Amino acid sequence: MDNDKPLISIVVPVYRVEKYLHKCVDSILNQTYKNLEIILVDDGSPDSCGEICDEYAKNDSRIVVIHKENGGPASARNIGIAVSNGLYISFVDSDDFVTIDYIEYLFGLIVNSSASVSSGRFHSIVYGKHVSCSQNINIQGNDEAILIHSKEIIFDMFHFYYDCSPFAKLFLRSDIIRYNCTYMEDMFFAEDLLFLFELFKNDIPVVIGGKSIYYYVTNINSIVQSSDKATNNKKYESIKVLEKTILEAKDTEYYTALIARYVSVCFHLLLKVDRRDQDSIHSYLVEAIKKHRKAVVADKSARNKTRCACLFSYFGFGLVKFVFSCLGKYLDS
């Protein structure tokens, strides 16, 4: 009986996803693991998402709906954490969907290893087509799993070898509370990275599985995909918060790896910013890259894509934009 198993909470931030929401929620309701608390956080969505959530709650007692003013996914996840009651907690984005054994697989990893966090792999879906499958540290096969202390993962996380997204993971909720881990609500970019960093620096046991259990769907309405001026301004403010984290980590073992991730984030935004409209942001990003590019080039653990961008930048940032617009998909990610 599933009622003999611990309650697991699943937090789903919901905003402007009426096209995707049914598939997402249905995939959660159909889990082979039944003892669930499904928290749908309507983040002030202007479409019919709020009504869809309420309708689901009428038909399944496991569903809890929270309606709030729009504050972004970080705010929605924080509220979900605050109201959750599960022994474990997982996060699913409302434009994504999961395999039928998503929770059962993640819970099984924890039971078999006595870990505090478990994670699996995910598929990326772009315009309806499968384009890639995430990599998690040397895990290749579906049946493999490794147990590792989280401090060791931090380096791989900053170097993109371990995914820092909140999804495809199951967390012991008491650890999140104990270490006061919350999403920074003034960030619209890289907030997942800082949340996981705050948790993992406490050196908790993490089990990493090789099975793909999550489908990440690229949604053109998402903050990450958007490149309009207002969104770029929000991302710029987020990068400044990330820079503060770098300064605080200057005397730690993570400093070099964090710089590599920071520079990668700067390049990501630089390629989206129109200098004519956002010259101050463009100048900030260029100077930040110049300040740290030598260290990144010297860091052999940094991903090749970032190191190449740093090398090209010595010959001009126009060359960086040209090369990555033409060849970016052929460089490693």
Image (tube, rainbow, N blue to C red):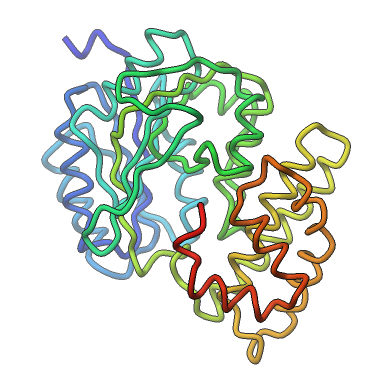
Q: Residue furthest left?
A: 59
Image-based side of 201 in relation to 190, left or right: right
Q: Position of residue 39 (x, y in %)?
A: 33, 40
- Which residue is depicted at the point 19% across and 43% down? 57
Which quadrant holds residue 86?
A: top left
Q: Position of residue 64 (x, y in %)?
A: 29, 39
Q: Position of residue 85 (x, y in %)?
A: 40, 26
Name the foreground residue: 169 vs 271.
271
- Which residue is depicted at the point 22% across and 27% down? 101
Q: Residue furthest bottom?
A: 276
Which quadrant holds residue 272?
A: bottom right
- Which residue is depicted at the point 34% across and 54% down? 14
Image-based side of 128 in relation to 294, left or right: left
Do we see residue 268 in this rendering? Answer: yes
Q: Residue furthest right?
A: 251
Q: Quadrant of the N terminus?
A: top left
Image-based side of 250 in relation to 200, left or right: right
Do we see residue 281 in this rendering? Answer: no
Which quadrant holds residue 62?
A: top left
Image-based side of 198 in relation to 108, left or right: right
Q: Position of residue 325 (x, y in %)?
A: 50, 75
Please determine whether, in this image, residue 176 is positioned above or below residue 274.
above
Name the foreground residue: 147 vs 315.
315
Please determine whether, in this image, residue 125 is positioned above or below residue 25.
below
The image shows a total of numbered marks equal to 0
Name the foreground residue: 249 vs 263.
263
Please determine whether, in this image, residue 232 is positioned above or below residue 154.
below
Please determine whether, in this image, residue 175 is positioned above or below residue 59.
above
